[in-house]
Image (cartoon, grey):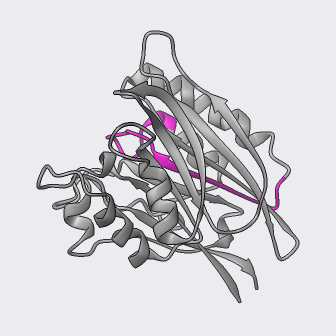
Amino acid sequence: MTVMRIATYNIHRCIGRDGKENYQRIADVLLEMNADVVALQEVTSGGEKGDMLAHLAGATGAEPIEGFTLIAAGAHYGNGLLIKPSVAAINRIDISVLGREPRGVIEAAFHLNHLHIRLLATHLGLGIRERHRQIRQLEEAVSASKADIDILLGDFNEWLSWSRPLSALNRRFNASRSLHPAPATFPAWKPLLKLDRLWVRPVDRLAALRTHATTLSRIASDHLPVVAEIIIDR
């Protein structure tokens, strides 16, 4: 059986529990996970302090894909992907809401074992109405997919585990609490909230889903990573 490891990780600009910005500490967490694809949130590129995304890509041997949504302190800021499989296509979808922080989705398509895999990575807004609108856009994107396997992942900023927007996504992915568990990820040192999530369709492709909770990951960022094992070839 061939299994692909996918992860989502809000790295909090590489600022850890100690208040220090440390690129290598996040890189070490990524090396611990050894994922084929990692969706990153709150990542930067360029700027006076160096290219965070390029550093993490170089440390893990992955290709960096930018999905930045704004410029802050001279650096691009937003989403990113670290991906090891060869990418067939990349699309960036704007899901920003007027008057709120710009938000986006990275859509990546790749092929493994003759299967077309489509991945959507995002970081949703802080406002309730904002997220409702963004999730409706994600639903539309998922429903239009013709891929063999669809993956949706990122930081959804939903504090209520079974809110109306999350329930809509669960229905879209034919998910249930038992088949798509959502582990608590925030704060990393004592997780209480299920902010970071991952869905797979067809649901039986999901072999396992867990947080990556280690001594290092509990201090490297304010979120724990979520890691999934996805069945590619039975």
Q: Quadrant of residue 96?
A: top right
- Tell me: residue 52, above or below residue 215: above
Question: Residue 38: image x %, image y %?
Answer: 52, 61
Residue 47 point in image, percent of width and height: 40, 36
Considering every residue shown, the one lying at the far left of the view is: 18
Residue visible at 42% across and 21% down? 101
- The image shows residue 22 at horizontal and vertical percentages of 26, 57
Residue situated furthest top in the rendering? 99
Q: Residue at x 24, y 61 (%)?
A: 220
Q: Please determine whether, in this image, residue 132 is positioned above or below residue 4.
A: above
Q: Nearer the viewer, residue 182 or 153?
A: 153
Q: Is 73 within the magenta?
A: no
Q: Write the residue at 51% across / 65% down.
A: 58
The x and y percentages for residue 19 are 13, 49
Q: Quadrant of residue 162?
A: top left
Tell me the quadrant of the picture where the C terminus can be found. Answer: bottom right
190, above or below 120, in the image: below
Q: Which residue is at a point 45% across and 63% down the rendered structure image? A: 181
What segment is highlighted magenta in the picture? 147-165
Instruction: Determine the residue located farthest toward the front in the rendered image.
Output: 48
Using the image, determine if residue 132 lies above or below residue 201: above
In terms of depth relative to the viewer, which is nearer, 136 or 162? 136
The answer to whether residue 154 is left or right of residue 86 is: left
Q: Quadrant of the N terminus?
A: bottom right
Q: Closest to the observer: 203 or 2?
A: 2
